[in-house]
Amino acid sequence: MRKNILFITESYHYAPSPNGNCVEKVAKELIHQGDNVTILTLKNQEAKKNFECIDGVNVFRVNTYAEWRVLFSNFGVNMISRVVSKIFKLLKNIFVPLHPFRSPGVLFNLYFLGKRIIINEQIDTIVAVYRDFETAMSGALLAKKYPRVWGMLYSLDAISGGVCSNQFVPENVHKKKCQKWEKYFMETFDIFCPMKSHKAVYDTTLYNKYRKKIKYLDIPNLLSDEYSYNINQDSTVNFVFTGMLTESNADCRFFLKIFKIYIEKETAVFNIYGGISNGIKNILKEMKLWNRNIFFHGRVSQEDLINIRNQATVFLNFGNEHSCGIPCKIFEYMSTGKMILSFSKIKDDASTPYLEKYGNALILMEDDKQIERYVKKINEFITQNIGYQISKKDINNMFYENTPKAFSDMIHLDN
């Protein structure tokens, strides 16, 4: 039966967050299956239109104060930028009692536009995507307002298992507040869908009352069958990373120590597609690798990524310091069947079970004492697997739960 589905998410299509990227893949699958999909999301510097239709998906966007913050930081005079920055820090303090909510205005904008969309588009299914509390809460309010509409909270990040981003809120206070809202969401929505990697958070007695509503999903980033990737057998080893490199998230500094030694004996390049912090950029320049062996290409289109993946010899993954955090990009990497080199900061890195199951991956725990040994291991790994590629059929069999279709099946079977 065809459904009219409304997703509420903090970004979509243009410069999307990892969550927004997941939603877009699911939306395309639902459209392919004959459903009608509407997206309610936020404006950003890349996406300013109130409404547009993208690949058959109706996309509505609301204003957010973050637009002004980005505008001033990018184009304002230095003094104005500093003043505006202080204003936003002050606002952050003012909204501490409302934590974990950050912007009442965004919440109201999402809720009121959401009401119009539900009526005008005859919505029968709401999927609120948690990354910000505003998107989750607006979905909950709409689910209460329209009880005939089936509601799902899709939580790609663990709500109470995540890290507090507000330095003025103690971690224990943050956790208690998140648990309170989690229970409210579980009461309100028809089903609550966290990731499989969050089981340690939700398989506790605290949530026994809501056990029947908790349905685990997984990150739906496995690429579709329409792409076939080639093995790059060029003599130059092409290490590829797609995403955002920073000191706190996808930290490549340990790999850089290895890479500098590796290129003394082997011919290799490291290509970065996405974003990079100034701190990492300065390290690359100090190491005299910037635009020599390491190249930064900025953001690229999904179409260009197909060719980029074809040219890759080895994909790079840099694990998180938090056990609930899975870099979504590993599923795109695994879709190619190619080699993956992954670095872990903690023993219970959430990427590890997937990469071990995948097989064509080398997983290394970061340890400065092991650098020389790791250089040899990496060289052996590449030499032994240079012509090997896992078939698309085997990948789909191993990771069906990571396809957009698995998400679509959940909506149609439970709704």
Image (spheres, helix red, strand yellow):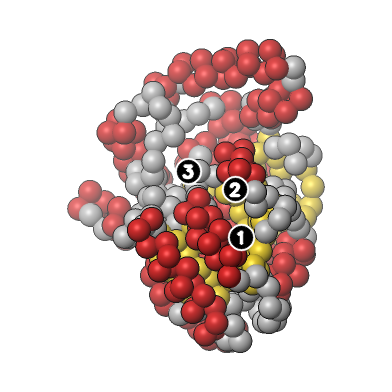
- In terms of secondary structure, where does tag 2 sit? loop
Residue type indicated by callout 3? Ser
The mark closer to the camera, 2 or 1, is 2
Q: From the viewer's perspective, tell me whether residue 336 is left or right of residue 52.
A: left
| Sequence-first disc among 3 and 2 | 3
Check the picture and name the quadrant holding the N terminus: bottom right
Q: From the viewer's perspective, tell me whether residue 340 is left or right of residue 305.
A: left
| Sequence-first disc among 1 and 3 | 1
Q: Is residue 116 above or below residue 170?
A: below
Crowd tier of the residue under label 2, counting other residues whose Cα lies within 10 Å: few below 14, some 14–19, many 20 or above: few
Q: Is residue 128 in view?
A: no
Q: From the viewer's perspective, tell me whether residue 288 is left or right of residue 202.
A: right
Q: Which mark is residue 241?
A: 1
Along the line of sight, which residue is nearer the eye, 328 or 60? 328
| Residue located beneath label 3 in the image | 248
Residue at left offset 67%, top offset 59%: 293
| Residue located beneath label 2 in the image | 287
Q: Residue 108: x, y in percent?
A: 58, 29
Q: Residue 343: x, y in percent?
A: 45, 61
Residue at left offset 53%, top offset 55%: 256
Q: Residue 398: x, y in percent?
A: 47, 80
Along the line of sight, which residue is nearer the eye, 48 or 370? 370
- In terms of secondary structure, where does tag 3 sit? loop
